[in-house]
Image (tube, rainbow, N blue to C red):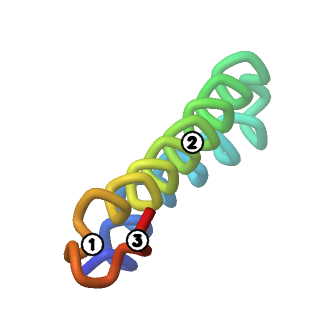
Amino acid sequence: MLPGFFTLTVGSLGLRGLTALAGGYRLEGFQDLSTMITIVVAIAAGLLFGTVPARPAAVRPAD
């Protein structure tokens, strides 16, 4: 499910940005591409930081 989510949301923004750049709309194209990069970083950070509290207590190292 996750690869499909990335493809549909982030991939469509990237394609929209590239299409705008190819059509001569530089400002809109770069804005879409920067939004795509921001979303990729936010989703990846959420996935990484979300796994830390979700780990079972038995797996966590003892202090």
Q: CA distance from mark 3 to mark 2?
A: 39 Å
Q: Where residue 29 appears, x then y in whole percent?
A: 69, 30
- Mark closest to the chain's N terminus, 3 or 2: 2
Depth-wise, is mark 3 or mark 1 nearer the camera?
Answer: 3
Q: Bin the neighbour count of mark 2 within 10 Å (Cα to Cα): few under 14, some 14-19, many 20 and up.
A: many
| Numbered badge on residue 36 | 2
Quadrant assignment, res 7: bottom left
Seen from this angle, which residue lies furthest top?
27
Residue found at x 20% / y 76%: 56
Q: Where residue 38 appears, x then y in whole percent?
A: 58, 35
Amino acid type shown at disc 1:
Arg
Determine the secondary structure under disc 1.
loop
> Does the CB distance between marks 1 and 2 fall below 8 Å?
no
Depth-wise, is mark 1 or mark 2 nearer the camera?
Answer: 1
| Numbered badge on residue 62 | 3
Q: Bin the neighbour count of mark 1 within 10 Å (Cα to Cα): few under 14, some 14-19, many 20 and up.
A: few
Answer left or right for 60 relative to 1.
Answer: right
Depth-wise, is mark 3 or mark 2 nearer the camera?
Answer: 3
Answer left or right for 24 relative to 62.
Answer: right
Q: Camera-side residue: 1 or 8?
A: 1
Q: CA distance from mark 3 to mark 1?
A: 14 Å
Amino acid type shown at disc 2:
Met
Vertical position of residue 48 compared to residue 43: above or below: below
> Does the CB distance between marks 3 and 2 fall below 8 Å?
no
Q: Bin the neighbour count of mark 3 within 10 Å (Cα to Cα): few under 14, some 14-19, many 20 and up.
A: few
Q: CA distance from mark 1 to mark 2?
A: 29 Å
Residue found at x 32% / y 75%: 2
Vertical position of residue 63 compared to residue 22: above or below: below
- Mark closest to the chain's N terminus, 3 or 1: 1
